[in-house]
Amino acid sequence: MKIPTVCPYCGVGCLLSLQVLDGKVKKVTPLNIGPGEGKLCIKGWSAHEFIHHPDRLTKPLIRKNGGFIETGWRKALTLISRSLLEAKEEYGGNSVALLSSSKSTNEENYLLQKFARTVIGTNNIDNCARLCHASTIEGLMKSFGSGAMTNSQEDIEDADVIFVIGSNTSEQHPLIARRIIKAVKKGSSLILADPRSIDLKAYATIHLNLYPGTDVALINAFMNVIIFEGLQDTHFIKSRTEGFHELEKLVAKYTPEYAARITGVDAKLISNAAKIYAKADKASIIFSMGITQHTTGVNNVVSLANLAMLCGNIGRPGTGVNPLRGQNNVQGSCDMGALPDFLPGYRRVSDVEARKTFEERWGVKCPDGRGLTLIEMINECGGKIKAMYIMGENPLMTDPDLNHVKKQLEKLDFLAVSELFPSETTEVADVILPAASFAEKDGTYTATDRRIQRIRKAVEPVGESQPDWMIISQLSKIMGYLMPYTSPANVMEEIAELVPIYGGVSYERLDKGALKWPCIDENHPGTSILHVERFTRGRGRFVTVDYNPPSEVPDEEYPFILTTGRLLFHWHGGTMTRRSKTLIDQVNEAYIEINPSDANLLRIFDGEKVKVKSKRGEITLKASITERVKEGVVFIPFHFAEAAANHLTNSALDPEAKIPEFKVCAVKIEKPSDFESFPKT
Ligand SMILES: Nc1nc2c(c(=O)[nH]1)N[C@H]1C(S)=C(S)[C@@H](COP(=O)(O)OP(=O)(O)OC[C@H]3O[C@@H](n4cnc5c(=O)[nH]c(N)nc54)[C@H](O)[C@@H]3O)O[C@H]1N2
Ligand SMILES: Nc1nc2c(c(=O)[nH]1)N[C@H]1C(S)=C(S)[C@@H](COP(=O)(O)OP(=O)(O)OC[C@H]3O[C@@H](n4cnc5c(=O)[nH]c(N)nc54)[C@H](O)[C@@H]3O)O[C@H]1N2
Ligand code: SF4
Ligand SMILES: [Mo]
């Protein structure tokens, strides 16, 4: 039996077929249609390997005498219900916080936020987008009125110039990197802005290896050159935008020479790159975490929006501002309102009319105040927050400053986690619920380019695990609010009714092919390119922003800039990929990339263990001496629990998006002789 479905890893949303034999998924093969066009990356090819892993959680577990004991569903859900109600009765609904999962389906995210707002009465719900593209949503909302990728994956191939900034596309969105490389081979130019010499450098006309956290200075200098040379699109600026004069005034001081001093990139290179971007008929900007995960994340994003509008690169094929969304369904979990300030479909919780729409359909009053964001929830554990429900997230690996996160989660009166596997976070839970995986349930995921696709049940859930949509419905019923859905298709009917951008979406249509939102009614074909004739907010707005340094910069004691990120072979906290043989055979050990000249000064050899310390914590891991990072900058992938990079990272937040600064903190490196105690003679 072959079941067509969607890859459970990244936001590209490649289609694959699960080959089932004797009730187990034995193999994955690509489908010839969809974003991957018949190809998969190594994670897609091995996506079946974790499904039947012996570590899968198969029964609900409750904490007893310092360990966990197995229990039945009824008992586990009753305990959760009682604990959440206790918190609600004693301290109010806002004493409960919920984390939704961007690995779960749209239907499940919709239900969890509905549960939060109806049963608990709180807007304290967030998802990993807070750690990821929260700055994109805030920034692009300000500039354009919609926070999503403006164009589609296919039309990247139409661009004359592709500007990739802060995205390691070949490792993190491999099947989009394939399109970039195809375009370059057909004659497009690639400009790369990244502090590391990532694989795409081999295809780049220019590589701007800036210091982490200096992107606003770089982009303002691009705009300085473009205006100085008269390369801006005056017609577009006049007819479609507002705020140009303020922008012109501000960028006057960002000469390439001034930006060179901040970014560490040669002024001539900055100027050449700006001219290449501006002279293109169609130029596409592609960005990801190198832009968003900063205390200036929103400013970084609006700078890119400014650059695109300045050159009229919006609303046409091959152009746009294209944030690559990370998790398989992070676009969807945001669309579904698993956010503390938005109801489904990006309607503000403060908007009385919007609340009324949902209240009428749900039959309950909705809370109006903005809820807490993910990091705010963690900081409030033991304070305002007494109980938490986490669906498919692993904050004890993926949040910044892990020592602090651990202390905070331990202050909770009650924590429930639904997961596929035991994780660092389930270890501190009071109840652990076994969740069904992507292969064991129906639903939809929304890929990075607003592409809604069907996932399909191929095998029965392992053990007694259940899909999150069933878990939430049952819990809700026990707590006194009926969620009488018989299937995820049923939930989608409600979503289509209440969320205009999903208005024309149904399982019947999705079975014939993907739909990209906005898809407003059953006859609407979906939308590949946003902002074609007008921006969602009317006119595009130039939001003028000055350069500000990161929250923590190197000093004498902590002389290196640490930037963290990912590898092709592993996924975040590693719960899934470190249970996949193919992937751990590739890499299964933490390391730190150090430039050869820094390694020389510290007398560190390739492959030896070093201790890395920040103001918040320390880890010991292997040194990898490489030109991939420039002098003064080091890189650690955050996948490995034994040397978790997030022991070091800084939890300072962007003031608007509340995203932490994962991409810059200051560290020192000690070589073995500084920390190993040798046996005394
Ligand atoms: N294999 C794999 N793929 C994934 C994931 C995974 O865990 N593993 N996670 C998914 C998720 S959720 C996400 S959000 C995406 C993330 O995808 P990416 O954002 O592409 O991944 P990162 O490795 O976090 O960092 C991106 C790049 O930013 C650069 N960078 C660091 N600091 C700066 C800076 O200050 N300025 C600039 N311009 N660049 C900087 C880094 O050198 C790196 O090349 O990947 C998705 N895909
Ligand atoms: N230092 C550093 N830290 C970072 C980042 C960085 O660049 N640097 N990037 C940040 C970013 S962009 C992101 S998106 C976050 C990701 O942070 P998380 O979302 O916490 O990371 P994951 O490891 O993907 O956790 C998802 C969990 O869900 C489980 N799961 C999978 N499918 C299902 C399901 O269907 N149901 C349920 N209930 N569970 C399921 C998986 O087993 C896994 O443990 O990490 C952030 N942390
Ligand atoms: S590119 Fe992303 S969606 Fe495609 S196979 Fe790889 S991980 Fe899966
Ligand atoms: Mo992400």
Image (spheres, rainbow, N blue to C red):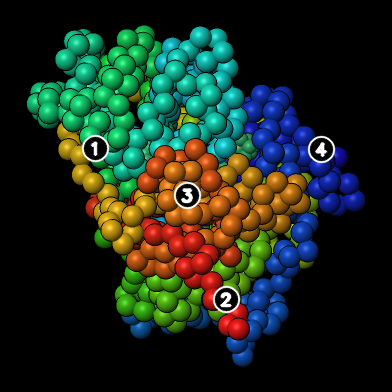
Which residue type does callout 3 highlight? Ala
Q: What is the C-alpha distance between the residues marked 1 and 2?
A: 43 Å
Q: Which residue is identified by label 3? A: 599
Q: Earlier in the sequence, mark 1 or mark 3?
A: 1
Can you say which quadrant of the picture contains the C terminus?
Answer: bottom right
- Point 48% across, 43% down: residue: 596
Q: Between residues 361 and 518, which one lies in front from this camera angle?
A: 518
Q: Which residue is identified by label 4? A: 2
Q: Earlier in the sequence, mark 4 or mark 2?
A: 4
Q: Between residues 480 and 601, which one lies in front from this camera angle?
A: 601
Q: What is the C-alpha distance between the residues marked 1 and 3?
A: 24 Å
Mark seen at residue 262: 1
* Ligand 3 in which quarter: top right
Report helix, strand or loop for mark 2: loop
Q: Which residue is identified by label 2? A: 678
Mark seen at residue 360: none
Which residue type does callout 2 highlight? Phe
Q: Earlier in the sequence, mark 1 or mark 4?
A: 4
Can you say which quadrant of the picture contains the N terminus?
Answer: top right
Which residue type does callout 1 highlight? Ile
State whether residue 117 is above or below residue 303.
below
Report helix, strand or loop for mark 4: strand
Ligand 1 under 8 Å from disc 3 Cβ: no
Q: Is residue 531 left or right of residue 574?
A: left
Residue 52: image location, x then y, percent: 78, 57
Q: Residues within 10 Å of mark 3 (few under 14, many from 20)?
A: many
- Point 33% across, 47% down: residue: 294
Which mark is nearer the camera, 1 or 2? Answer: 2
